[in-house]
Image (cartoon, grey):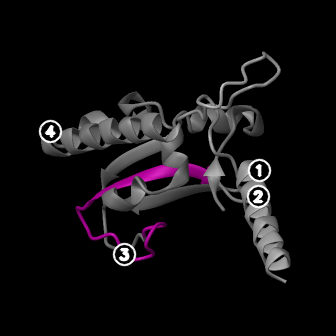
Amino acid sequence: MLKRFEDNELGESISRRVAYHCTTEYAKSSKSTCRGCHTNIEQNELRLALMLQDEEGYKNTAWMHFSCFWKHPETKKLDGIHEIHNFSKLKPADQEKISTAFENLKVNKSTTKRKRKVSSKKNGNDDSSDEEFTPKSKVIAKKSTTSTKRKRDLDED
């Protein structure tokens, strides 16, 4: 799996040469392959790249189609448009397209990071209305229904 470079993993000369984690441009030829879907990126098509490293620590520029870029897990770590190198060199329509995608990414980030409410009996809160159904209580519920069935079978005999 490819991941972004950590600042402490880069040598001093490398960190000066690659001062960005993400870049964008229009494909110069149709030779590059998308790291997301593994198909060719056509010439003059908008492409985005993450600066990633493999298990051995080698630097890789992972070019991707616009749609494949947003599916990569490392993309979710980007903070905003200011992290995209060459963003200002794009056509206004493509800049708007990327801006909209970042807004959607932020919305998805905020909806997926919900905290689960768990009641604590340490504080003396013993209200059953505050308790949420947890996997532990699910197991207990299954055991209690099984024992009830066994009791019924024994009572019938």
- Circles 1 and 2: CB distance less than 8 Å? yes
Label 1 to label 2: alpha-carbon separation: 5 Å
Label 2 to label 4: alpha-carbon separation: 56 Å
The crowd level at tag 1 (other Cα within 10 Å; few <14, some 14-19, many 20+) is: few
Secondary structure mostly seen in magenta is: loop
The crowd level at tag 3 (other Cα within 10 Å; few <14, some 14-19, many 20+) is: some
Residue 40 — which label?
3
Label 2 to label 3: alpha-carbon separation: 50 Å
Disc 4 residue type (three-letter):
Pro
Whichever of callouts 2 and 4 sits on the residue coming sooner in the sequence is 4
- Circles 2 and 3: CB distance less than 8 Å? no
The crowd level at tag 4 (other Cα within 10 Å; few <14, some 14-19, many 20+) is: few
The residue to which callout 2 is attached is: 139
Q: Is mark 2 on a helix, strand or loop?
A: helix
Residue drawn at point x = 60 percent, y = 51 percent:
52
Q: Nearer the viewer, mark 2 or mark 4?
A: 2
- Circles 2 and 4: CB distance less than 8 Å? no
